[in-house]
């Protein structure tokens, strides 16, 4: 194969006039139509001077054209760097600079804001809007609808996905063609995807879940996707009867269960519901089965590793667990201090190894060495245990991380900004239970002597540089932060103190 990822996911569909994407307005994009757009984009990118191994940063709304940019990158050997649309110019600036992206693709409405970012990083800026318009597509139509696929090997890089670090600096996880391909094949087989499947796709496509899990599996199997711009309850309920499978974060499933229109009849013909990216509460699992007769299949993964474990397709899908290691992937529970494997039943850090595990963090050899062992095991930062039947349970995190509605927030990044605010002496940012998002962000402040910090002004100011989903939903002032004898802030005590803030 000249380009394993392109040939396996995209190339094999060339010439097929069967549907690939079904849009909310009822229109259909065929496999071949999609690939022709992708080829025009690949030609345009080449014209812009982007060559194999270069990066392009992409902060655009979900659309068929946005997905075609991913396909174009794979075909041209360009490293695809998708970014959350909620990121501010400050945040985007870091990713563009750090990755050395040659092109920054954004929505027209953001172009004025992001032009200085692109200029500072010597990147070309182009626009692509949700409706497919923009400077990028206008230029692309003049290009041929075929492109000579650039040869790549399985070990070549296909994508950078940035994941925040405990120190506040984001790390670019380097994913190879083999990482993505092995996971697509393993998951498609484990979950029995075929070309008759129609996946209801309501996830964003700038993260592993919506981009690699949902999309790559569908492409691998040759199925179709009902491609919705975002998770909108009315739209999901209207489209569910046309689908066979759905993937989502737990918030998708709790929102569906909160709606009376979501009935057994509506879900009757569905083959599979998959949940991941955040813990699915056992009670959600049980309520879902009671309402629909379906047991949600929960799996476990992360940006650096794609998917690691899954509950079985056939056999018991056990609530509160993420199942077994996927084919070809090893999972072990180790002692954080010694790295030794622990006996069954003990709680320890989860480590994984396999063809799905990334190559390292872009230009961060020390960070890579801290988390990726020489023998190939990746230290996930999650804590878990195997139950007596070998199902993996995730019991907590060894990393200071909040997961809200499936988005990750690293407290350190928020604390650094909070500490800069007027009248703030110090701060601690914690995650507390939230009925919709699972967890949400709370900022605990200590005021400088004699100061009375203006909490509304602080929130407004932080919103200028921080994506809205990372902003504390509540700020509280305490006389001091609880600390242990070593002086370390006791976040556990704070989490307990504020546990009922949104659920009480
Ligand atoms: C939106 N908002 C959130 C939020 N999403 N706040 C906290 N957490 C979130 N996840 C805020 C917005 O900033 C806005 O705030 C308000 O909520 C309304 O925005 P919205 O866009 O209308 O929200 P909504 O459409 O309801 O989005 C919620 C959601 C979405 C759950 C549907 O967040 C979502 O699609 N999440 C999926 C994330 C995902 O794909 N994760 C996979 C990561 S990969 P304001 O202040 O402006 O009103 C990974 C690996 C793996 O983890 O294992 O899969
Ligand atoms: P990300 O860095 O966005 O890829 O997020 C990965 C993290 O999400 C993992 O390290 C876990 O902490 C969490 N995660 C993913 N899937 C699950 C799951 N099924 N249950 C609990 N946590 C999960």
Image: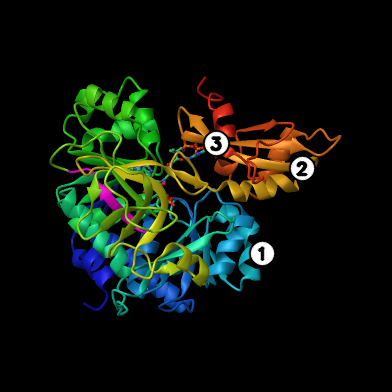
92 horizontally vs 361: left or right: right
* Ligand 1 contact, mark 1 (Cβ < 8 Å): no
Which structural element holds mark 3? helix
Proximity of marks 3 and 2: CB atoms separated by less than 8 Å: no
Residue underneath mark 1: 116
Q: Is residue 202 above or below residue 233?
A: below
Residue underneath mark 2: 425
Residue placed most toward the observer, 422 or 245: 422
Residue placed most toward the observer, 109 or 96: 96
Can residue 375 be seen? yes
Residue at 63% in and 45% down? 488
State the extent of the magenta-drawn residues as a range.
303-312
Magenta-span inclusion, residue 285: no
Proximity of marks 1 and 3: CB atoms separated by less than 8 Å: no
Residue 428, position in %: x, y? 64, 41
Residue 107, position in %: x, y? 53, 55
Magenta-span inclusion, residue 309: yes
Residue at 25% in and 35% down? 296
Residue 442 figure quarter: top right
């Amino acid at each position: 194969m000249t380009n394993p990822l392109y040939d396996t996911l995209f190339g094999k569909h060339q010439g097929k006039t069967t549907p690939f994407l079904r849009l909310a307005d009822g229109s259909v994009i065929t496999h071949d139509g999609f690939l022709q757009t992708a080829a025009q984009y690949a030609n345009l990118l080449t014209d812009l001077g982007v060559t194999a191994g270069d990066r392009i940063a992409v902060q655009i709304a979900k659309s068929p054209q946005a997905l075609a940019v991913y396909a174009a990158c794979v075909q041209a050997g360009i490293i695809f760097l998708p970014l959350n649309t909620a990121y501010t110019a400050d945040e985007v600036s870091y990713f563009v600079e750090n990755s050395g992206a040659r092109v920054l693709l954004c929505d027209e409405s953001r172009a004025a804001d992001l032009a200085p970012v692109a200029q500072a990083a010597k990147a070309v800026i182009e626009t692509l809007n949700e409706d497919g318009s923009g400077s990028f597509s206008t230029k692309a139509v003049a290009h041929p609808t075929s492109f000579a696929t650039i040869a790549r090997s399985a070990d070549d890089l296909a994508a950078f996905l940035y994941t925040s670090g405990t120190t506040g600096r984001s790390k670019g996880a380097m994913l190879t063609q083999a990482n993505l391909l092995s996971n697509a094949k393993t998951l498609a087989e484990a979950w029995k995807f075929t070309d008759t499947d129609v996946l209801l796709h309501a996830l964003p496509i700038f993260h592993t879940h919506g981009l690699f899990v949902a999309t790559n599996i569908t492409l691998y199997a040759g199925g179709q996707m009902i491609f919705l711009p975002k998770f909108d309850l009315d739209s999901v309920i209207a489209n569910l009867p046309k689908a066979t499978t759905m993937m989502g974060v737990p918030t998708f499933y709790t929102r569906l269960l909160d709606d009376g229109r979501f009935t057994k009849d509506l879900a009757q013909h569905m083959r599979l519901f998959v949940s991941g990216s955040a813990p699915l509460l056992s009670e959600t699992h049980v309520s879902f089965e009671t309402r629909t007769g379906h047991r949600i299949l929960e799996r476990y993964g992360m940006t650096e590793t794609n998917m690691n474990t899954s509950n079985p397709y056939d056999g018991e899908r056990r609530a509160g667990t993420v199942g077994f290691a996927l084919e070809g992937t090893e999972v072990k529970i180790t002692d954080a201090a010694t790295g030794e494997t622990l006996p069954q039943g003990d709680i320890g850090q989860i480590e994984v190894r396999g063809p799905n595990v990334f190559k390292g963090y872009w230009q961060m050899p020390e960070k890579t060495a801290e988390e990726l062992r020489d023998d190939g095991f990746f230290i996930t930062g999650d804590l878990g245990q195997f139950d007596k039947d070998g199902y993996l349970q995730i019991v907590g995190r060894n990393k200071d991380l909040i997961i809200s509605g499936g988005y990750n927030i690293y407290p350190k990044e928020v604390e650094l900004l909070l500490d800069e605010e007027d009248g703030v002496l110090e701060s601690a940012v914690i995650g507390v239970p939230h009925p919709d998002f699972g967890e949400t962000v709370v900022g605990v402040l200590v005021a400088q002597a004699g100061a009375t910090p203006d909490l509304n002004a602080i929130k407004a100011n932080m919103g200028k540089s921080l994506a809205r989903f990372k902003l504390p939903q509540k700020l509280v002032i305490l006389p001091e932060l609880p600390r242990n004898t070593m002086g370390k802030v006791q976040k556990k005590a704070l989490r307990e103190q504020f546990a009922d803030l949104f659920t009480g």
